[in-house]
Amino acid sequence: MQDDERDQADAATDQPAQPVEDTQPSQAPSEAEAWVVPPPPTPANPDVIAAHPVPATPLSEGTVCPRCGTDNRPGIAFCRACGQRLIAPGAPAAVERPSPPDGTQACPRCGTHNRAGVAFCQNCGANLRPSDAGAAEGAVPGAAAGVAVAQARAAAKADAPRRAVLGPVVLLIGAAGMATGWLLPFAFGGASLWDRAYGAPGAYGLAFWRGYPEGSVLKSAYFGLAAPVPLLVLALVVLAIVGMLRASPAMIQRIGLLVALAWGLGLAALFLVVELVGGPGGDVVQILRALSPAGIIFLLAGLIVVIGSLTRLWRA
């Protein structure tokens, strides 16, 4: 009897257990309950790291990488250890460029640290000289740098005061010739204009019109232009000095240049009419012997004054 009961118990244990059905229906958790987020599945490849969502971290605070836990500086877009994006796409990144080490200087074009004192960047060839022109050439590559430097030089040249040299020098040469002719024997009489003005008793002095010759209007006009030549010499010296200080003559300078131009032309023309044509006549040798030294010098100096006056007026 006991053997039959043991056999029935063994047969019951050999049969598979029937699954117990859950008689309670599944219900969603209420608002007071919390959903338990299941952990992310482990990938088949252990070297692959699953991506993490982008944290909304302000730029003013430090960012801890959600993937590897590295603490990054504020404003960095990607983790410095694993490359995980740390800010939302499109958000501006405020990455602080590290300062160059001691004894080096950073290239303004590519940021390469070069040894202090070098003239050009060893990476991109930018000009590292401290001058304004060198900075402009290093910041603007190619032909644009040359254009910028040329414009800067042209502006500096335009702002600088311009001065004349040729015209004033010619006027000074003409003034020296006029003074020499005034000291040499004149056409009328053997004495020079200096002797007739101050050398003899009863000389005319500043009142040169008292020494006009009689009997010819042309001779009187010739003497009237030659006697007050010291006034012309003084005016020429003043015009030359002012011209060296300012290239373009002003209105008063133009008036003085026109007076000097007319004076020089009058002396040259009256020399030809009075001394050359109205002289003793005869062949060329006799005419040249009869000409006064002062007249020849007045002719040459008058032409020089004309050239100098025209040169200055052309600059106007």
Image (tube, rainbow, N blue to C red):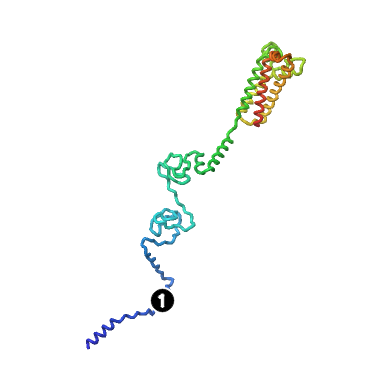
The single residue placed furthest to the left in the displayed view is 2
Considering depth in this image, is 311 or 240 the residue closer to the camera? 311
Image location (x, y in percent) of residue 101:
40, 44
Q: Quadrant of residue 151?
A: top right
Q: Quadrant of residue 85?
A: bottom left
Task: Tell me if residue 93 can be seen.
Answer: yes
Considering depth in this image, is 113 or 231 the residue closer to the camera? 113
The single residue placed furthest to the top in the displayed view is 201
Residue at x 45% of width, y 39% of height = 119
The single residue placed furthest to the front in the displayed view is 283
Mark 1, secondary structure of its residue:
loop
Q: Which quadrant of the rendered structure holds the N terminus?
A: bottom left
Image location (x, y in percent) of residue 274:
73, 17
Name the side, left or right, on which 133 lies relative to 43: right
Considering depth in this image, is 105 or 272 the residue closer to the camera? 272
Residue at x 43% of width, y 48% of height = 98
Q: Residue at label 1?
A: 26
The single residue placed furthest to the right in the displayed view is 215
Image location (x, y in percent) of residue 15:
30, 82
Name the side, left or right, on which 116 lies relative to 252: left
| Crowdedness near tag 1: few (<14), some (14–19) or many (≥20) residues, C-alpha within 10 Å | few
Image location (x, y in percent) of residue 316:
66, 32
Disc 1 residue type (three-letter): Ser
Task: Tell me if residue 291 can be seen.
Answer: no
Residue at x 26% of width, y 83% of height = 10
